[in-house]
Amino acid sequence: FGTSNTVGMLRLTDGRLRPLLFDGSPLLPSAVYLGTDGRMLIGRDAERHARLDPSRFEPNPKRSVDDGHIFLGDREMPVAQVFGLVLGHVATEARRQLGAAPEEVRLTHPARWGDRRRQALVEAARVAGLPNPRLIPEPVGAASYFTAVHSAQVPVGRSLAIYDLGGGTFDATVVRRTQTGFDVLAEEGLQDVGGLDFDHAVVEHLGKSYTGSHGEQWTKLVNPTDA
């Protein structure tokens, strides 16, 4: 469950791995949109409806994990419920492909997330109708993929350095190989360095360029006075 996109993988009983596809793509935008009829739209459907009423659209709900609630139009929704609607979209596709509910669910999370944030993921899985998930730090998942899928040899006791530049944050982690998997040795991150922050910097640069020549129009764009 990412800031910008969510990805789901199926591991079948014979060990084969298969990505879940959403509108033909393995990437599901994490975006949500609350329609005037109360129906929640997820992913690309949400993005397509955003232009109708931007106040009902949230492209990056994960960024609100500490806020408790997310405002969509005139409605205030618990963060875990919004997360659960996105995960529910993944669960529906998983059940469709499997013909049944998955027997086990694993959810990754940033290594720096504490108990309260991790609990929001557990609650979101419950809202989505999924089994109680096994939570795995994202760098541990990345290291496991590196060794299992790419057949990289990392002897027990050796370490890997992993960085994750996402939509909202930058995280760097050192993990050590153990007999049973990987343990996180150290982690550090920047909470305000991600793809969205790069986008914002570009907009700020454009603002400095256009304020002098098109000041009134630029002000209307960045400080709208109505919906």
Image (cartoon, rainbow, N blue to C red):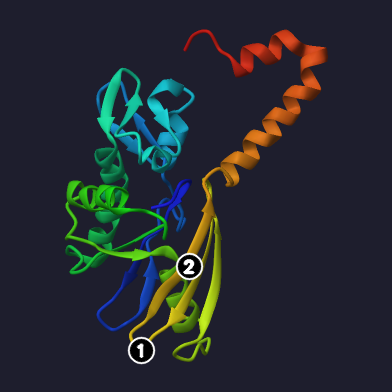
Q: Quadrant of residue 56?
A: top left
Residue 32, horizontal then vertical, whole percent: 37, 36
Q: Is residue 31 left or right of residue 74?
A: right
Please, what is the three-letter code of the amino acid marked with disc 2?
Ala
Q: Position of residue 119 (x, y in %)?
A: 24, 51
Read off the residue under disc 2.
Answer: 186
* Distance of label 1 from label 2 (alpha carbons): 19 Å
Q: Which mark is residue 59?
A: none
Of residue 149 and residue 135, the one placed in the foreground of this image is: 135
Q: Residue at x 37, y 81 (%)?
A: 181
Question: From what the image shows, is residue 80 above or below residue 108?
Answer: above
Q: Is residue 191 above or below residue 32?
A: below
The residue depicted at 23 percent of the width and 62 percent of the height is 133
- Residue drawn 69% across the image and 28% down it: 204
Q: Is residue 30 left or right of residue 202?
A: left
Q: Which residue is mark 1?
A: 179
Q: Secondary structure at mark 2?
A: strand
* Image depth: mark 1 or mark 2 in front: 2
